[in-house]
Amino acid sequence: MAKKSMVAREVKRKKLVEQYAGKRAALKAVINDQERPMEERFRASLKLAKLPRNSSATRIHNRCQLTGRPHAYYRKLKVSRIMLRELGSMGQIPGLVKSSW
């Protein structure tokens, strides 16, 4: 089980990303628009730099929804390999059969 503080930090990051998504997209559009004057694009890049770092989508780390484990994460199922094995053994994941010999 992951530390609760780490899971809470990820939840906080996701909330910040949602909150600032529109603002970041608008500023990036201004920065990437070659038609605009250089000064305006530079001011937009300064505004983008002043936004919180955790509002960037690249700061989010995938975690298992059941345990909070950050490594060995299966995106399709949103669980770690350990929970995948346990749930597969219990027959709770449709179509997954754990092999044994």
Image (cartoon, rainbow, N blue to C red):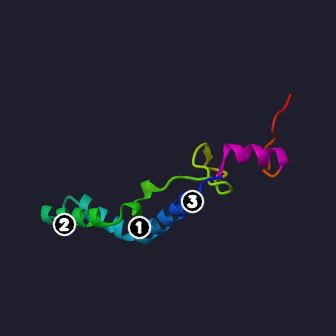
What amino acid type should be assigned to the residue bearing mark 3?
A: Val
Q: Residue at x 23, y 62 (%)?
A: 45
Q: What secondary structure is found at the residue carrying circle 3?
A: helix
Q: Nearer the viewer, mark 3 or mark 2?
A: 3
Q: Earlier in the sequence, mark 2 or mark 1?
A: 1
Q: Residue at x 40, y 64 (%)?
A: 55
Q: Position of residue 20 (x, y in %)?
A: 40, 69
Q: Residue at x 32, y 66 (%)?
A: 51
Rounded to the nearest whole Å, what is the CA distance between mark 1 and mark 3?
21 Å
What amino acid type should be assigned to the residue bearing mark 1?
A: Ala
Q: Earlier in the sequence, mark 3 or mark 2?
A: 3
Q: Earlier in the sequence, mark 1 or mark 3?
A: 3
Does 17 sit left or right of 11 as displayed?
A: left
Residue marked by disc 1: 21
Q: Nearer the viewer, mark 1 or mark 3?
A: 3
Label 3 Cα neighbours within 10 Å, binned few <14 / some 14-19 / many ≥20: some
Rounded to the nearest whole Å, what is the CA distance between mark 2 and mark 1?
19 Å
Which residues make up the magenta segment?
79-91
Q: Position of residue 99 (x, y in %)?
A: 82, 34
**Predominant SS of the magenta segment:** helix
Residue marked by disc 3: 7
Q: Residue at x 27, y 62 (%)?
A: 49
Labelled pair 2, 1 in contact (Cβ < 8 Å):
no
